[in-house]
Amino acid sequence: MNAQPGTHEEGGERVRAIPARHPGRWVATIVAAFVTILVVIGFATNKNIHWRVVGHYFSDNAILHGVVETLVLTALAMAIGVVLGIVLAVMRLSPVPLVSSVAWVYIWVFRGTPVLVQLLFWGAIALFTGQHPAVGLPLTHIVFFHVTINTYIGLFTAAVLGFGLNEAAYMAEIVRAGILSVGEGQTEAAQSIGMTRLQALRFVVLPQAMRVIIPPTGNETISMLKLTSVASVIAIPELLNVTETIGERTFQIIPLLMVASIWYLMMTSVLTVGQFYVERHYARSALRVLPPTPIQRFRALLSRNMLRARPEPPMFPLGREHR
Amino acid sequence: MNAGAVMVKAEAVRKSYGRFEALRGVDIEVARGEVVVIVGASGSGKSTLLRCINHLEKIDGGLLWVNGELVGYQQKGDKLYELNDRNIARHRESIGVVFQHFNLFLNMTALENVMAGPLQVKKEKRDSARASAVQLLERVGLKDKADAYPAQLSGGQQQRVAIARALAMQPKLMLFDEPTSALDPELVKDVLDVMRDLAQQGMTMIVVTHEMGFAREVADRVVFMDEGAIVESGSAAEVISKPKHARTKAFMSKIL
């Protein structure tokens, strides 16, 4: 837009800028609103869901125990996964060929077979080792001690091991990518003030690698929470197993599946919020200004809308260059 | 060897990267309290020499002493035994390094950067480490930036924090690897001022730089390197203004 000298007043008079129209966005909004209303009405009025049954079993004691079991299983499996994953990542980056090869083979095996197969293996570990496997030096008669594998206590341990050892293989790759993302200059600087390689890793490299490690770890935790439902195949009383049992007993399969779904959604939602704040914490090293939290964003939105109904279109001074 | 007056001594030091010979037999002696400025084109081996002195690179031939101790090796009889990680780290404590790209620890504030060495390496108490770190930041003119993260600092500020971080280990020798090359021109002066103060206080310094003004003013000796060897060495007036060697002349005529 050009200000014509002569047709306008002299100097920096202001001209209003009109925002562009977007008719396509209105169409998309209406379509999306229509579909949303259909889905909501469909769920609210579907007789087969039996919302009263859902409400009745939602806080049922057995269900709550299942929720706790799911959370404990997730926490333990992730703990094993993260700790062993860090060890494996450091091993893979080791200059000793055999050490890095061992880590490579571990990751190859545990990522290359389905977790369900691994779980069944751990569940049937007694068939693999015998009831009283000996711990000693192989190919000799030297035996340190015998272990007794109790099949019943073994099931929960089997699930924790199955998920945890499988997760470690994935975490190892995530941690390794994080370590590699930190520049060599950081290690050199740490060494230049007298840190050993291990100190440099612990105080300088790993804290910075966290920024790369945290987001996928959050995703892994959320996946793990859902993956624990697979443990129902080896009769672990976690959330899905418990809801299925009740559902089959009372012939209320759909309402009980709704109960399980709502619980899973609630738990993953809480984890997602937690992930946001942890990520924000570790972003300090890379960003000058941290992104606002949702609460800050909400407040900013409110205060803006209180002050004036609509954001003012920008004003550009024009005609100055013609002076 | 006599460690009293000599801080760094290199004898026929060689270093190769694959087929490329970065250092082809470098001999140099730096006295205690001396400020040596190394100049030369990129690829002439200046930075490699600094990195070898701090054992960030392993040398392939020759001998290198810092403060009377062999770098990276221990001599027993007529054999050299390579030192382990821990002993190399102990040697490095007395050598401060300032890098071209600062390499501040990005996960720590300015103050934490300066405290890191004393805390983790020297195992000092937190209070005393903090007190001396604050003093050092004041010395480089950045006391008010103590709680800033590197991402919130300008290049010149980051480099001054990096100098403070190196000084926190109370080094006997400071190595500067093109400390102002990555800085905007208007930020160079602050960094050079800090380095000049340090030189006046008697610190032994080896500085790789293209700042000829700084070399003229501060250097006890200027060394010109080309193709992995020392070509010419002498006072700033001799080497910069009246170079004898043809290659030195060619280099100086290009940058002055």
Image: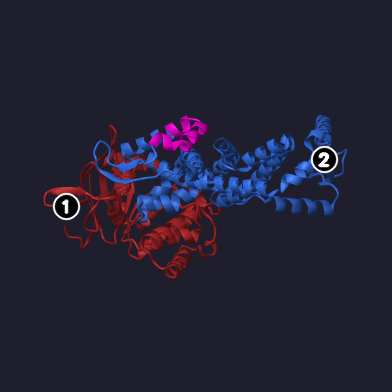
Chain colours: A blue, B red
Q: What residue did someone put label 2 on? A: A17
Q: Is residue B206 visible?
A: yes
Closest to the observer: B165 or A146?
Answer: A146
- 1 vs 2, front mark: 1
Can residue A318 be seen at all in this image of the molecule?
no
- The disc labelled 2 sits on which kind of residue? Ala
Left or right: residue A128 versus residue B147 is left
**Badge 2 element:** loop
> Would you say the magenta stretch is mainly helix, strand or loop?
helix
Q: Residues within 10 Å of mark 2 (few under 14, many from 20)?
A: few
Residue designated by label 1: B75
- Name the residue located 68 percent from the left edge and 40 percent from the top edge: A246
**In the displayed structure image, the side of residue B60 where residue A267 appears, left or right:** right
> Label 1 sits on what residue type?
Gln
| The image quarter in which residue A266 lies | top right
Do tags 1 and 2 sit on the same chain? no
Q: Is residue A111 magenta?
A: yes
The answer to whether B198 appears left or right of B145 in the picture is left
Q: To which chain does the residue with label 1 belong?
A: B
The residue at 72%/50% (across/down) is: A297
